[in-house]
Amino acid sequence: MKEKKRRFETEVIHLGYRSEKHDNSLIPPIYQTSTFTFANAEQGEKRFAGGEEGFIYSRLGNPTVKILEERVAALEKGEAALAFASGMAAVSAVLMTLTKTGDHILCSNGVYGCTFDFLQLLKQKYQIEHDFSLMDSMEELERKILPNTTCIYIETPINPTMKLVDLQMVAQLAKTKGIPVVVDNTFCSPYLQTPLSLGCDVVIHSATKYICGHGDVIAGLAAGSKDCMERIARTVQKDVGGILSPFDAWLLLRGLKTLPVRMDRHCENAKKLFMFLKDHPKIEAIYFPGDSQSPDYSIMKKQMKKPGGMISFTVKGTKETAQKLMNHLELIKIAVSLGDAETLIQHPATMTHSAVPEKDRKKMGIENNLLRLSVGLEAWVDIKADLEQALAKI
Ligand SMILES: *Cc1c(COP(=O)(O)O)cnc(C)c1O
């Protein structure tokens, strides 16, 4: 039976799962097994040869994980998706699949700290070069794309400066040159932004963040065309082996169900806190995609459903002033990661981006007095009160 096309809020709960195939269990079962038995030797032979559909061994595929992959593929408007043990397992598998020695990767002007480190590894070990670009105009892109560029890698909003990249513009130009565009969609989740529908080729998630939403899983996802996902699955995913466990896939399926409800609340709280913080006398600058004064506001309107739940800001003062603010917070927890029910604050220069050399950090706009706030699901007035009392003490 063909599945009906339903709304996002319905698909996050139902898509890809048929209870009648699982003893009518309402919730997908956890197939906690390493391997699958064959009825006979010939069936085993056929499965290995790809001549018969079916599971073989959980590193190559698992029923619980498959439900998650099918659901995410549809939510991201892709043909297929793959689940990984972490966001970095997804990032590294995608980049290793799309590049070889001598190639060049063009990145947005700022990437997640460990992605930055992985790019150094690719360069040092395999002579795969990379550059950063503001990607703010066709001319800039034309200038930065080299004859050996085989991948364009984008974060938008960029972590932690919240700068946006116009995905449609980049995808349009990349298409004429046959270069795949990869987007780390972690900050938005498919509820707020679907890069594949804007012409990009691969979407990556640290599912640890909004997709899980409960701060209890490390996981990664990639979505895109069937061809591309098969290439990744058959090579890097299978042989490097950073696969997701069935239990963690089950937790992600559980978290996904409330993604739209949670995101609406994250976004609503963030908007209200932005209004409170933007004119605060102790705050120097604030970065939020929902800022109508920001030059990126039109890009936000064009490609995001809502501005998201992340706010970055600089305090008037130094690194020590920023750290003092953090230390005075009572409700808001000091922690990296994001997208959880709890409001979290971190100091990018000494935490998520501490591995990035200071001069590169400055180029990315990561000042020493910059803080990143992941707005949680608490009552916004309680979050505001906590920020207010801590700001009064710096
Ligand atoms: C956290 C994060 C990652 C890495 O994901 P892990 O699940 O921690 O491996 C990659 N990209 C972004 C934007 C992230 O926030």
Image: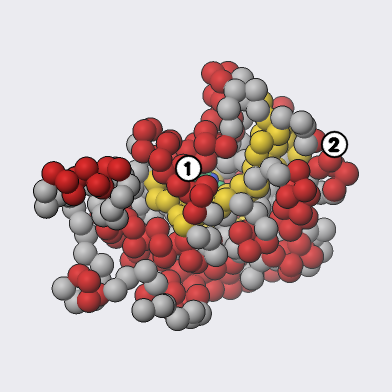
- The residue at 85%/49% (across/down) is 137
Q: Position of residue 144 (x, y in %)?
A: 80, 35
180 left or right of 85 in image: right
Q: Nearer the viewer, residue 281 or 198?
A: 198
Residue type beneath disc 2 = Arg
What residue sits 68% from the left and 61% below the top? 198
Q: Nearer the viewer, residue 97 or 326?
A: 97
Dot 2: what SS? helix
Image position, residue 253 (x, y; %): 35, 64
The quarter of the rendered structure image containing the N terminus is bottom left
Answer with left or right where residue 357 lies relative to residue 258: right
Q: Measured from the top left, where is residue 9 in percent x and y?
A: 47, 77
Residue holding disc 1: 231
Q: What is the three-letter code of the residue carrying label 1? A: Arg
User: First in sequence: mark 1 or mark 2?
Assistant: 2
Q: Say which residue label 2 marks.
A: 143
Q: CA distance from mark 1 to mark 2?
A: 30 Å
Colour mode?
secondary structure
Q: Residue furthest right?
A: 139
What is the quadrant of residue 193 in the picture? bottom right
**Local crowd size for mark 2, using a 10 Å CA cut-off: few (<14), some (14–19), many (≥20):** few
Which mark is nearer the camera, 1 or 2? 1
The kind of secondary structure element at disc 1 is: helix
| Foreground residue among 373 and 109 | 109
Q: Position of residue 106 (x, y in %)?
A: 70, 37
Q: Is residue 303 visible?
A: yes
Is residue 229 depicted above or below 272 in this figure?
above
Which residue is at a point 67% across and 58% down the rendered structure image? 199
Res. 13 image quadrant? bottom left
Along the horizontal axis of the image, is 93 left or right of 28?
right
